Image: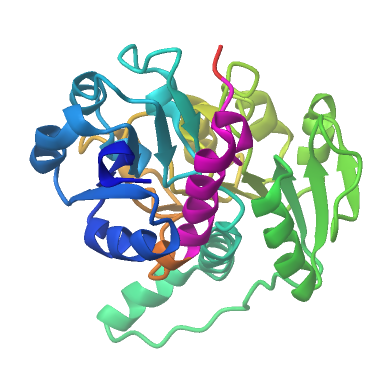
Amino acid sequence: MSNSLKKTVLIRDMDAGWYAGQLSKLCPQYTYIPATDSEAALGHAAKADIIIGLAPYLDQNLITAASRLEWVQALTAGVDNLLAMPALRADVTLSNCNGFHGPQMSELAFLMMLSLNRDAPRMQRNQAEKRWERWPQRLLFNKTVNIVGVGAIAEGLAKRCKAFDMTVIGVSDGRATAPNFDKMVKRGALLSAAAECDFLIALTPYDAKTHHIIDAKIFEAMPAHSYLVNLSRGGCVDETALLGALKNGDIAGAGLDVFAKEPLPENDPLWAAPNILITPHIGGMADIYKQQALPLVARNLNAFAAGGPSALSGLVKRN
């Protein structure tokens, strides 16, 4: 294929140069343009047949300017902003990156469970104040974790929970069994399942059916010693109800990596809520992320060249 017939791939990422170098060897049938910032990407958008990048950084201006765009390959699993973007034409194929986020998401879940369960913030305050204080340490051993949403990430988390001798309950309408889960229940049974848990972890995708799937009724059902961990999307949790549950002591605490509005506004009351651990949507991030994403992106580029959109993995259906 001559250079004039090659499709042009615009890569919008801080590591765009690295991706372009690797992909030019793995998928030489394309021309690559790396762009590390929005301004540079916008300047090349009109030439792009394909755009690759982290979904949150692919904005309306970029997509609008890409008049010959055929396909967007997100480097993230979540593509909420792209699905809601009027500029993304119906004839443009959208695919995501999934299946490799299990290690980093699981480690953040454990960071939150261990920190909340053992009261790590109290330890840090004591260290700063040079105070020697000891108290009985709550263990994860024999605790019950309820995972709402059973996909590849949940499977990775369940495997690690079993290494801590935890009981793992899954909540899913799509699966009846999964490796390392002791029990699976339907979403309709979430209320009764929540009453059994020590930790309730949200990993479900966000859509109309899962909007506020964890609400005031769930918090009322959860034991007072239990914790919520939300690693899915902010809209899956009723944050007003959560704030009330924390203030009233209905649950022991919460670890939140995602929020209804991001970045979380400085005046949001969640910042000052009791017994809460807040992280800035870092669950999917990793120091090896580009190495994790590269094989999937390369497979899809080769598949697209050979068989078009229908050959892609991670295709996202749009209404």
Outermost residue, front direction?
2
Please give the name of the residue rendered at 44% of the width and 62% of the height, measured from the top-left corner.
26
On screen, residue 221 versus residue 261, left or right, reads: right
Give the side of residue 295 with respect to residue 39, left or right. Answer: right
Q: Nearer the viewer, residue 218 or 213?
A: 213
Q: Is residue 32 left or right of residue 164?
A: left
Q: Which residue lies at the image location 85% right of the left edge and 31% below the top edge?
A: 186
Q: Quadrant of the C terminus?
A: top right
User: Is residue 4 highlighted in magenta?
Assistant: no
In the figure, 126 relative to 238: above or below?
A: below
Magenta-highlighted residues: 292-317
Q: Main secondary structure of the magenta part?
A: helix
Snapshot colouring? rainbow
Q: Is residue 195 visible?
A: no
Q: Position of residue 73 (x, y in %)?
A: 43, 39
Q: Tell me the quarter of the picture where residue 51 sits.
A: top left
* Residue 304 is a magenta residue: yes
Image location of residue 288, percent across then percent down:
42, 70
Whether 213 is drawn above or below 51: the answer is above
Front in this rendered view, residue 259 or 20: 20
Camera-side residue: 35 or 121? Answer: 35
Q: Residue at x 34, y 11 (%)?
A: 86
Residue 159 position (above or below residue 251): below
| In this view, 36 is above or below 127 | above
Count every numbered label the image shows and give the total.
0
Q: Is residue 273 visible?
A: yes
Q: Position of residue 223 (x, y in %)?
A: 72, 45
Q: Is residue 138 left or right of residue 123?
A: right
